[in-house]
Amino acid sequence: MKNRIKSLAREFAPAFIDIRHHIHSHPELSFQEYATSQFIQQKLDEFGVRYQANVAGTGIVALVEGKNPSKRTVAIRADIDALPIIEANNVPYKSKNEGVMHACGHDVHTTCVLGATRILQQVKEEFEGTVKVLFQPGEEKHPGGASLMIKDGALEYPRPQAILGLHVLPNMETGLLGFRSGKYMASADEIYITIKGKGGHAAAPHLTVDTILVASHLVVSLQQIVSRNNDPFSPSVLSICAFNGGHTTNVIPSEVKLMGTFRAMDETWRFKAHELIKKQATELAHAMGADIDIDILVGYPTLYNNEEVTAQARSLAEAYMGKEQVVDTEVRMGAEDFAFYSQIVPACFFRLGTGNKARGITSGVHTPTFDIDENAIEIGMGAMAYLAATLAV
């Protein structure tokens, strides 16, 4: 079956590069992917694949049934949303939607999973079980489309015994796949802090509560949450990324707003840190005479790659690609809402190399110049199809 899938991936690749161009040039923001969803449904109709639309809004759940459909179920997932970025690439498939761009590769993910779906439909008499295909909205926006897909029953009827996802990796050369077992990507929570006090004239600070000073102390103090409370062998990051207050040179403002992010690789430490942040920020503000409001928006959990599923997926990838084309990837403090699936179903989230230094294709995700070496499309669709068809669960 490996050779059959490779042959089909090679045959279908040009058409799916065109599909990628269409998706890339028509990006839509999170939870607004109406045209994208319709386009995917049109392709599934052409492939003869049955599906359910309007899952979590614009999401789609498709099924490819092989022999003995109830014997095993493996899910594969693609995210379909884009980012609010103005594209700087001068290419024929440049975004037609001003200010919106597929800068994180979700156009690639969707294309590869669509391609895998077509291949699986072609070889469905050659594998056992069912492949459930998730086209998911809103990966880039809280609360994460994965969580809403799960609430809408995407992991039920049938329930998969394993789930696979792929993501572009621009600093990895095209032709390579990357795997890592265990804790792979961090949780991500949003921190919103408002510091309030009596404002007034900068020449009379003794008659005010200096919210700028309180906020400045707080930014420095919060770094101790990680450096003096977290196990140094467990990665964690707390970054304050916005400091907004005041509007002129001689007025102490009555309010300052801070915003930031907290990342962790351990779920127990994650929620302990939330309490420490609230306690330390509140006590410091009160000690300096200010009032404070703190809101920590709980976001995506830690992404955990199941050891058994990941080991098997890597072995299958080596069989499909060649051992030298499969590499280890590092722990990442970025977050992915695929993590919601990994908390429920044994998961493997792997990386698709899309860079090409010789051709100058090196821009990272979430940049206006992000693009890929499109030879990765054939690799991604073929590898995903092979793993989904042969993974033993």
Image: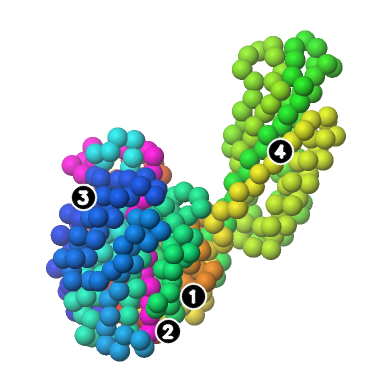
Name which of mark 1 and mark 3 comes first in the sequence: 3
Name which of mark 1 and mark 4 comes first in the sequence: 4
Q: Which quarter of the image is occupied by the C terminus?
A: bottom left
Between the residue at mark 4 and the residue at mark 2, the CA separation in whole angstroms equals 48 Å
Residue at 34%, 73% in the rendered image: 132
Name which of mark 4 and mark 3 comes first in the sequence: 3
Q: Does any portion of residue 104 appear in the rendered image?
A: no
Dominant secondary structure of the residues highlighted in magenta in the image: loop
Classify mark 3: residues with Cα within 10 Å, few (<14), some (14-19) or many (20+): some
Nearest to the observer: residue 58 or residue 4: 58
Between the residue at mark 3 and the residue at mark 2, the CA separation in whole angstroms equals 35 Å
Front label number (4 vs 2): 4
Name which of mark 1 and mark 2 comes first in the sequence: 1
Between the residue at mark 4 and the residue at mark 3, the CA separation in whole angstroms equals 45 Å
For badge 4, the amino acid type reads Asp
User: Residue 250: image x %, image y %?
Assistant: 69, 11
Q: Which residue is mark 2?
A: 393
Q: Which residue is mark 1?
A: 346
Callout 1–callout 2 Cβ contact below 8 Å? yes
Question: Does the magenta-highlighted stretch encompass residue 286?
Answer: no
Asked whether, in this view, residue 163 is left or right of residue 245, the answer is left
Q: Which residue is mark 4?
A: 293
User: Residue 228: image x %, image y %?
Assistant: 77, 51
| In the image, residue 175 above or below residue 70 | above
Q: Which quarter of the image is occupied by the N terminus?
A: bottom left
Q: Does any portion of residue 142 appear in the rendered image?
A: yes
Callout 4–callout 3 Cβ contact below 8 Å? no
Question: Does the magenta-highlighted stretch encompass residue 74?
Answer: yes
Callout 1–callout 3 Cβ contact below 8 Å? no
Which label is found at residue 22?
Answer: 3
Give the magenta-colored segment's residue range. 72-94
For badge 3, the amino acid type reads His
